């Protein structure tokens, strides 16, 4: 081939394992919001097809669970219902979103096997479809929060209120409630990398979803959702410095995710370290998801 022909020849196609293709997949996936938005809506419609009250079953299920366990644990921990019930309710709502991102994220590509093999769309579309569907369910569950907020508004707006007897005083609901918006956005962004990373791993190793589903119940009870960090310092045996007791919760990453959104919604004290921990996991998580997309994006269609 002559030098002139070499200059006119098109460049060789990039390798399937390339950073550019991984980046292009993620960018194009976010751009195709009409596609993953429509698919997410269809998931909700299909799930409650021919149902009388439709998606409101999501709200009723959350209300029954949160109120039932809230009343039970308020008696077990000798807590005040007007402040403890909103704490548990919002904790359940936030946990339900996080739990969905983890458990349904593992099935992201397996569940979309037919579309992956026949629809030429970026893999990121299917991860965003999962996060969008969970966001719609989260919006339905917020109706429970609104009702609880109206009922216990006086208690939650009282300065220095406590969740449990003898617990740390909380500032109460104020303008800080607006921080719930960026907090949820940050949680949704984390849901994206969880669905991509866990989805790819679970597509290759089909035992991973079962392992995660088995561990998620344990993580629920280890995370301060139906109990508070105040209970650790008050009920655990031992005297003196109680900082080591709080570490039981602080060393659990899911606690920071839950508290990041729950704190502004019920007027709890908001700490910057929750944002720092979640922000750190966001950067690391998307880095790992980017590496997984770079190395295994082209193999997912064969693994499913």
Image (tube, rainbow, N blue to C red):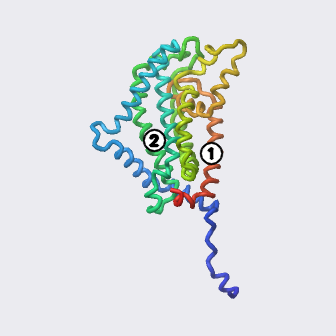
Does residue 176 show up?
no
Residue lying at the far front in this picture: please name it. 207
Q: How many marks?
A: 2
Quarter of the view holding residue 147: top left
If the image is split into quadrants, where does the N terminus sit? Answer: bottom right
Instruction: Measuring from the top left, give residue 188's x and y in whole percent.
Output: 52, 42
Please give left or right for residue 81 compared with residue 300 in the image.
left
Q: Which residue is mark 1?
A: 285
Residues at marks 1 and 2, CA–CA distance in whole angstroms: 19 Å
Report helix, strand or loop for mark 2: helix
Between 277 and 289, which is closer to the camera in this rendering?
289
Locate residue 162: give its quadrant.
top right
Q: Which mark is residue 165?
A: none
Q: Earlier in the sequence, mark 1 or mark 2?
A: 2
- Relative vertical location of residue 112 with respect to residue 79 in this rendering, above or below: below
Contact (CB < 8 A) between labels 1 and 2? no
**Residue that appears at 57% across and 60% down:** 299
Image spot of residue 35 (x, y percent): 43, 55
Q: Secondary structure at mark 1?
A: helix
Residue 194: where, in percent of width, then height? 56, 45
In x, y percent, where is residue 252?
63, 31
Q: Is residue 28 above or below residue 70?
A: below
Would you name the residue on which mark 2 appears? 134
Badge 2 local density, few (<14 within 10 Å), some, or many (20+)?
Answer: many
**Residue for point 50% across, 16% down:** 158
Say few, some or many: other residues with alpha carbon within 10 Å of mark 1 (under 14 / 14 to 19 / 20 or more): some
Outermost residue toward the right in this view: 240
Q: Is residue 69 visible?
A: yes
């Amino acid at each position: 081939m002559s030098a002139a022909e070499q200059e006119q020849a098109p460049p060789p196609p990039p390798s399937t394992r390339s950073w550019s293709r991984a980046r292009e997949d993620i960018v194009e996936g976010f751009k195709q919001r009409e596609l993953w938005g429509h698919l997410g809506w269809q998931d909700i419609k299909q799930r409650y097809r021919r149902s009388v009250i439709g998606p409101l079953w999501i709200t009723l299920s959350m209300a029954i669970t949160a109120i039932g366990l809230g009343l039970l644990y308020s008696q077990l921990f000798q807590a005040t219902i007007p402040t403890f019930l909103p704490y548990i309710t919002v904790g359940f709502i936030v946990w339900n979103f996080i739990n969905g991102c983890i458990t349904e994220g593992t099935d992201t590509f397996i569940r979309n096997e037919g579309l992956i093999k026949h629809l030429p769309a970026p893999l990121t579309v299917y991860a965003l479809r999962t996060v969008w569907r969970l966001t719609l369910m989260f919006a339905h569950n917020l109706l429970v929060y609104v009702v609880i907020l109206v009922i216990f508004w006086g208690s939650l707006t009282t300065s220095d209120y406590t969740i449990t007897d003898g617990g740390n005083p909380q500032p109460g609901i104020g303008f800080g409630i607006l921080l719930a918006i960026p907090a949820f956005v940050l949680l949704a962004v984390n849901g994206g990398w969880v669905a991509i990373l866990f989805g790819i791993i679970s597509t290759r190793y089909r035992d991973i979803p079962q392992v995660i589903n088995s561990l998620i119940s344990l993580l629920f009870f280890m995370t301060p959702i139906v109990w508070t960090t105040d209970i650790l310092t008050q009920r655990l045996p031992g005297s003196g410095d109680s900082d080591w007791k709080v570490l039981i919760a602080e060393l659990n990453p899911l606690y920071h995710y839950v508290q990041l959104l729950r704190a502004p919604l019920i007027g709890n004290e908001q700490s910057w370290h929750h944002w720092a921990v979640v922000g750190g996991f966001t950067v690391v998580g998307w880095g790992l998801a980017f590496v997984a997309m770079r190395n295994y994006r082209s193999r997912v269609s064969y693994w499913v």
